[in-house]
Image: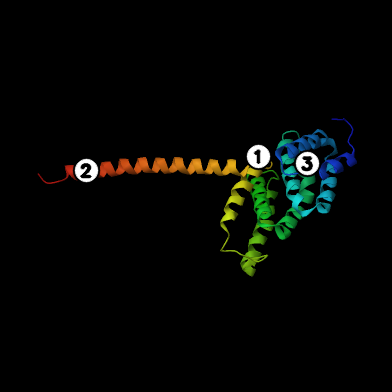
Amino acid sequence: MGSTFNPQILVEKLAKLNNSQTSIETLSHWCIFHMNKAKQVVETWDRRFHCSPREQRLAFLYLANDILQNSRRKGSEFVGEFWKVLPDALRDVMDNGDEFGRNAARRLINIWEERKVFGSRGQILKEELVGRHLENYNRNGKHQGMKLQKQPIGNTVDKIVSGYQVVYGGQIDEDVVLNKCRNAISSIEKVEKEIGSDIHSGITRIAFFRQPL
């Protein structure tokens, strides 16, 4: 990793960016290393985002999220610069992306608002983008041929996986996530059965002692 920032090197790295955690974290660390060039980094990110294939744009958002989360303790340079460009990038994904992309964008917005990444401005971002998008849904009743009230079961899986991606900053194994969900559900059901058995047993004992002699 050199000490001199070269925008062309960043362009080349962004062209190879994908949703994997390794790809996102490696480039994020490189960008944060050049934090004193935050303005140039973000301007390059913005230009390449709008020139990139649509299927790659979610990786750009994951990269921005990783940079924001890991650079805040060192300074607010990236926060200020990304605030200038992220609303348009998010709007692009919300308006033109698929359901998976929209779900991921909404989760990023919620995380930034909850963690106060942009301070009080995070609430404004949430109200403007998420609120406006829901308003469009309610007005039109559908989005790109999909009904609002009837969503395919696969959508639920997408939401679970996209939530993990946002938290862990990259692509993960869907089978691993689903196995974790199944194990959690199994554990809950086991507890419910044990509790239900105890309650039933207790009721039986109470009923026995209340019988007239």
Disc 3 on helix, strand or loop?
helix
Left or right of residue 106: residue 3? right
In the picture of the structure, the residue carrying the numbered disc 1 is: 168
Q: Position of residue 173 (x, y in %)?
A: 63, 42
State the mark number for residue 78: 3
Q: Position of residue 211 (x, y in %)?
A: 14, 46
How packed mark 3 is, by other alpha carbons closer than 10 Å (few <14, some 14-19, many 20 or more), is many
Query: Do the numbered discs 3 and 1 sit on residues whose CB atoms are within 8 Å?
Result: no
Task: Report the Cα–Cα distance between label 2 and label 3.
Answer: 65 Å
**Callout 3, which amino acid?**
Phe
Task: Report the Cα–Cα distance between label 2 and label 1.
Answer: 50 Å
Task: Report the Cα–Cα distance between label 3 and label 1.
Answer: 20 Å
Q: Position of residue 77 (x, y in %)?
A: 79, 40
**Callout 1, which amino acid?**
Tyr
Which residue is at a point 32% across and 42% down the rendered structure image? 197
In the picture of the structure, the residue carrying the numbered disc 2 is: 206
Disc 1 on helix, strand or loop?
helix
* Of marks 3 and 1, the one in the foreground: 1
**Callout 2, which amino acid?**
Ile
Image position of 151 with respect to 173: above or below: below
Front residue of this view, candidates 100 and 71: 100
Which residue is at a point 65% across and 66% down the rendered structure image? 145
